[in-house]
Amino acid sequence: MLKGFTLTMWVGFGGFLGSIMRYWVTYGMAKLLGVTFPYGTLLVNLIGCYLIGLLGTIATQRIFLTPPLRQQFLFIGILGGFTTFSSFSYEALELFKERSFLLGSIYIGGHYFFCLLFVWLGYITVLRLY
């Protein structure tokens, strides 16, 4: 059974991996589409929502990780380091401060609608495969 310091290390290692993946995606999207809209943050959050729906369902259906390791390493560590709700909130505020109310509203609405959709898609993917 994993305890204390060991679980903390798994969270840290997962966060390290997730943060690097987030950087690659956001940097790549900025190079590809520019920086006028935070495409990278939106994509990271969509991917993260899909993965938590997919992996959370697989993990509970097929139990490939122990519950503590799944929670600490996968969800808190990797996906917590990868997804960017704080960045999302800051970027939304910046759009509103620039008086881009329509873009800000699309950005917020897009996150809420599509992230929920992607969690559901991850869930459905597992149900269809198993």
Image: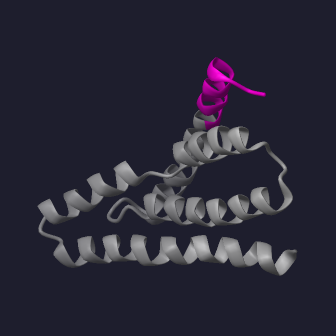
**Residue at image point 49% right, 56% down:** 31
In the image shown, does 53 or 103 lie closer to the viewer? 53
**Residue at image point 85% right, 59% down:** 62
Residue 50 x %, y %: 62, 66
In the image shown, does 1 or 34 lie closer to the viewer? 1
**Residue at image point 68% right, 24% down:** 3
Quarter holding the N terminus is top right
In the image shown, does 2 or 23 lie closer to the viewer? 2
Does 47 lie within the magenta span?
no
Q: Which stretch did the figure color magenta?
A: 1-14
**Residue at image point 83% right, 53% down:** 63
Residue 41 x %, y %: 44, 58
- The quadrant in which residue 104 appears is bottom left
In the image as oriented, which residue stretches furthest toward the front? Answer: 1
Quarter holding the C terminus is bottom right
- Say above or below: 111 vs 128: above
Horizontal side of 90 relative to 97 (left or right) equals right
Horizontal side of 61 relative to 85 (left or right) equals right
Residue 113 x %, y %: 43, 78
Dominant secondary structure, magenta: helix
